[in-house]
Image (cartoon, grey):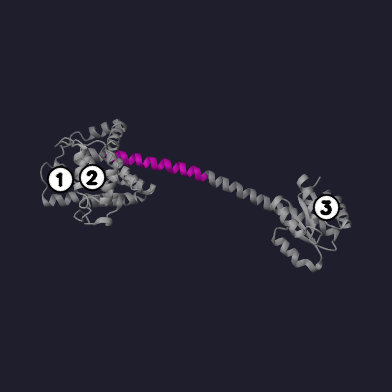
């Protein structure tokens, strides 16, 4: 059997003629004498096609079109109308009708009109299914891409951590320095309400802050005693060298700013640009406090680690000079035990194999002196 058709007209003779003609072509036909009856029949058994007169007693054909379109969107709706109502039929098609029949209805043309309406509705359903499947596929691919991006970012960060560990041992002989400074900076940045993207760039910039020192000769970087003015100029160039290395990598653009400006001072006496106050990127203003905290509370070849109270007093003393007062306030809000927990976590999760390999590779270097830091 072919598709089911519901004929709706308040003239019984029209319903009979249409249903008999369509039945001759194998369609299953039912009839209704009004819009309300039609909706009841559709609720009990849906039809693939509804053919409705526009002018009926009670519910009009236009109102029925709206109800069918909302409740049974997969049904093809055709309207029947007199010659004088052609404009109304066109309006009905704008609202979702597939075709219209002009009264008196030419029975021989009804079958072809129904077939066109069914084909149109079939194509609409196929397009809807294709769009739905495409949206599902795009959503699935998007999730897969997001997972891949997270894996790539994790690989990036693991690489940066390894590079930071290598830089630590070449310059300071302080294992975990870059990781501790990064964690300290993140703690203050979160206290200041930094965004996720800012936190990401601060973490990466902290890991790579001294990457430019790979371009500084060992004779200067590892020199014991005070550097000459010329040697100090070479040493200070590490920020530019580091920036030139990092800025070429798209995902490290924000981190590159920290690499370039991590030696700036809040009062404008730092280098390389002598930036003042808010001219210094926030990440660099946070980093310098974290770096000072770690430098003072870590063992160095030339001195033992100082107590946290000494570091806190130094940060307070330099507020408004070396350090941004707002960053200092964020630093003071974090309890001492939080800093101790960070140090313990970094010490406990440091990659031993990586550290041993780096130490072995650098075992013949000259001990670092205070002037090199």
- Between 309 and 221, the one lying in front of the other is 309
Q: Nearer the viewer, mark 1 or mark 3?
A: 3
Separation of disc 2 and disc 1 at Cα? 12 Å
Q: Quadrant of the C terminus?
A: top left
Crowd class of label 3 (few under 14; some 14 to 19; many from 20; radius 10 Å): many
In the image, residue 36 above or below residue 354: below
User: For this view, does 158 lie left or right of residue 263?
Assistant: right
Mark nearer the N terminus (3 vs 2):
3
Which segment is the magenta one? 141-164
Question: What secondary structure characterizes most of the magenta part?
Answer: helix
User: For this view, does 252 lie left or right of residue 226?
Assistant: right
* Label at residue 220: 1
* Label at residue 32: 3
Q: Nearer the viewer, mark 3 or mark 2?
A: 3
Separation of disc 1 and disc 3 at Cα? 98 Å
* Label at residue 214: 2
Tell me the element at label 1: helix
* Label at residue 109: none
Residue 209, percent from left and from top:
26, 46
Crowd class of label 2 (few under 14; some 14 to 19; many from 20; radius 10 Å): some
User: For this view, does 173 lie left or right of residue 145?
Assistant: left
Q: Is residue 354 magenta?
A: no
Mark nearer the N terminus (1 vs 3):
3
């Amino acid at each position: 059997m072919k598709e089911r058709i519901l004929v709706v007209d308040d003239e019984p003779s029209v319903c009979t003629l249409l249903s008999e003609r369509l039945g001759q072509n194998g369609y299953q036909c039912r009839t209704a004498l009004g819009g309300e009856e039609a909706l009841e029949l559709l609720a009990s058994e849906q039809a693939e096609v509804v053919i409705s007169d526009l002018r009926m007693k009670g519910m009009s054909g236009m109102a029925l079109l709206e109800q069918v379109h909302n409740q049974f969107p997969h049904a093809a709706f055709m309207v029947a109308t007199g010659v004088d109502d052609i404009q109304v039929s066109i309006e009905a098609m704008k609202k979702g009708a597939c075709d219209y029949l002009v009264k008196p209805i030419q029975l021989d043309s009804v079958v072809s009109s129904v077939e066109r309406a069914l084909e149109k509705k079939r194509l609409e359903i196929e397009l809807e299914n294709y769009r739905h499947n495409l949206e599902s596929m795009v959503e699935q691919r998007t999730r897969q891409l997001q997972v891949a991006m997270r894996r790539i970012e994790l690989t990036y960060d693991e690489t940066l951590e390894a590079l930071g560990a290598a830089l630590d041992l070449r310059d300071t002989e302080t294992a975990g320095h870059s990781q501790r400074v990064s964690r300290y900076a993140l703690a203050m940045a979160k206290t200041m309400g930094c965004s996720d993207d800012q936190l990401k760039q601060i973490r990466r910039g902290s890991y790579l802050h001294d990457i430019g020192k790979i371009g500084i000769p060992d004779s200067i970087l590892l020199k014991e005693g005070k550097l000459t003015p010329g040697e100090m100029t070479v040493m200070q160039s590490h920020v530019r060298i580091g920036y030139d290395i990092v800025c070429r990598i798209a995902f490290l653009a924000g981190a590159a700013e920290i690499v370039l400006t991590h030696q700036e001072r809040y009062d404008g006496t730092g280098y390389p640009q002598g930036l003042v106050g808010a001219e210094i990127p926030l990440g660099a203003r946070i980093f310098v406090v974290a770096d000072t905290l770690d430098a003072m509370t870590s063992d160095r070849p030339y001195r033992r680690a100082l107590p946290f109270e000494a570091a806190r007093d130094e940060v307070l003393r330099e507020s408004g000079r070396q350090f941004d007062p707002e960053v200092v306030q964020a630093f003071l809000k974090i309890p001492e035990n939080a800093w101790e927990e960070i140090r313990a976590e970094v010490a406990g999760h440091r990659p031993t194999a990586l550290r041993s390999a780096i130490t072995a590779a650098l075992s013949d270097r000259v001990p670092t002196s205070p002037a090199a830091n």
